[in-house]
Image (cartoon, rainbow, N blue to C red):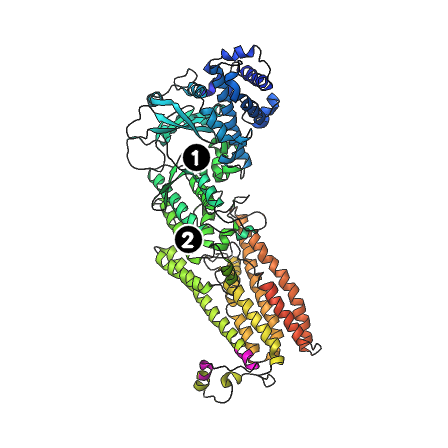
Amino acid sequence: MTRGRQGDGAIGRLEHLTRFVGELAGGGAPGGRRGGLDRWRAHDWHVALLDVPLDDRAYADRFQVTREREIERLWAWWPGRADASATTPRTAGFLGFYLLTLVAMHSSDRVRFHGDAPWDVRVAGRLAAELSTELVADADVRRALAALHDPDAGWASDASGPALAEWAALDLTSLEFYRHGTTSLILTGRAAQPSQGRTATFVLKCVIHPYLTIPAIVDATRGYLDAHGRQGTDEPSPAVPVWASHDSWILMDLVRGLTMGEYLARRAAAQPPPPAREIQRLVDTPALRDLGGALLTALAELERDRQRHDDLTPSNIIVQDEPPGQVRLRFVDLGVNHLHARSITGQGQGEGVFAAPEVRRDGVGHPLADLYSLGALLVAIAGVPHTTDGTVPDQFYVVSVGLARLLEDLTDADPARRLLVTPVDPARPTFEQVGRVLRDEVAILEQDGRERPRGAWQRLRDLSPGAGTVARQHRMVQTRSAQVRDAAGAAHLRQARRLRRWAWLFAVLIWSATALVITWWSRDLGLSWQAKWFEMADEVFGRSGAGLVFLDDVRAADYPVPDPWGNLPVRLVTLTFALVSARLYLNVFAELSTVWAMPRDRRDRLRALAAEVGLRSLAVLPPLYVVLPTLVQRDWWPLFTLVGHVTFAAAVQACLWFAWATNARARAAGLSSVPRGEIATLGRLAAWQPTVAVYLVPIIGIGTLLSLGLVQDVLVYASFVSLINLGIFYPRAPAPTRRTSAPG
């Protein structure tokens, strides 16, 4: 067995090797050690390479030189090796393979522990991939590599017949470096005698030598063909076909294409710079539709073949472009990545964030692990950075609560809690059903349009009250109508229709109230106003005379119209209050609801009901607060200013009451999808309350003084209220919060 032959003389061999490298780099004569290395058999090199410390710090502690410095010393010597008398070509080839091993380990550590992109890792002043390419291009290094991975070598376990036959058919002189893997060097080449039905080019994934001391890695590599091969079938599969596998290598088809990591990096580079505020980062809806959809299709095909991946990460997914404008995804390296399993508990660096917690904890596969990895991949595909605690980023709650809920349902740390909310029939293929739900939520996101890039004109339009909310609600109902297939779809449609009705009702009320304010202002200014509907109302109710008789009947006797200067305070305050009300309800609250699933507990149900009443009251009461002082009594505007802001504060407090209790219950239940610390969007809503409280103090004080006639400068106060309305509540409206809402 490979892992069993590290023993006798290993330490001495590696110490001998590193001292030799030090003398080579120092320009001095390596003395008798040159002859010692020239007498080394392939087995001696194999044993020495197995002994290389897996950890960079352990390497430095043992040899008093960092691994990176060792790479620099060897690379400085490598170009002139042919002119030096210190080594034979054979020994130089093994030294080159030693350097190749150190570079591969350095690349693995940078990706896993420092979050570097695999293609951007640098060492010795060059890209790691460039160093490896030059090393593998050397014929002596290729011969050393072939000797160290020969399945018929004396230190390897007994090779199967297919492994020996496939190895013998390879043209090892054609080997080229392809890319670095987490625990491997990935090479390409041509088969001298390609097997029928396979490509003439192959990928040879060679495990980095020191990792062969980990029994789980050796066992998984040797058994890869038996576990993930598909002999005797011509059915297409998303898993790349495997030719053979042995202790230290896996042989498979070469599938051209970018890894998903490379694909997403190129896509991100073509996008505009991210906004200063992370919450405003756009969700990449086209990528979710195309790449996310292709990922679900590939997983459904893998499930059809009764396979699972267990290490679904961007580097293990190949993206192939297929006309017209479509992509196909292929999977490589199926099975548990034992380096992720060996990492510490919690979210790691690099691709460790995609591994399911149970896989990292137990080091074995799990039937629901691919669900977790799918959720993490969808977050990356959407172009949103992962959170440090593994929860769903807030950007998803801002643009689509339904999509955020799906991601929550996929990425719960407890496998038993995955897909608890998403309607999935256990008797049917899981990923096919999840793919349908994803397509539905992406369709809702696409018709919404808020996540699309904004030009200057569109950003200006976004400041308008409502910003197309009613039209968006209508499109949502149409989309949900087309998606109804089962009870869950019908519930989504009912919710969308209900929220649309409330949005329509509020829009009609608030714009009617605003029209009244503008009409009365025009009357104050003596402008001609030919409003047929006013005349019709007078006729219906049998009223006649000058002015708008039917509406003027309700006006108080001490409320003159026209009176431009005397009515200016009430006109300013009611108009700005109407604009604020439209923005707060249509832009923030119109798409929120707490009745999607009423809690069973009486107190929780009361909180949910209070929040829902508060939300819907904001669709009815603010227009009333605008109309009454406009039509009945202009001196009521200080009272309704107070009542209006108390109404807003009460509604927000009811939402906070519900949200805090709901999050507390979720945390008590151990849901990993709920952040343990502060929730940013919920914090923004809570932070709005003190602003309202501070604002109410002068409203109450000055309003009382105005009512008692102790303050005369009414216009100054009205201007103050109007500026505060627009200055605080308009641009700083609270954002929708996670877990207080349901998808429309």
* Alpha-carbon span between mark 1 and mark 2: 29 Å
Q: Which residue is mark 2?
A: 441
Q: Secondary structure at mark 2?
A: helix
Q: Residue at x 68, y 72 (%)?
A: 702
Residue 515 rendering spot, x and y as whole percentages: 51, 75
> Which sits earlier in the primary sequence, circle 1 or circle 2?
1
Q: Which residue is mark 1?
A: 365
Which span is picked out in magenta? 519-535
Q: Secondary structure at mark 1?
A: loop
Task: Sort mark 1 into few (<14), some (14-19) or many (20+) by Cα contacts within 10 Å.
Answer: some
Asked whether 112 or 318 is in front, the reply is: 318
Residue 71: name its quadrant.
top right
Residue 62: name its quadrant.
top right
> Mark 1 is on which residue type?
Gly
Q: Which quarter of the rendered picture does the C terminus lie within?
A: bottom left
Residue 560 rendering spot, x and y as whole percentages: 59, 84
Q: Judge left or right: residue 100 versus residue 254.
A: right
> Mark 2 is on which residue type?
Glu
- Please say whether residue 177 is visible from this viewpoint: yes
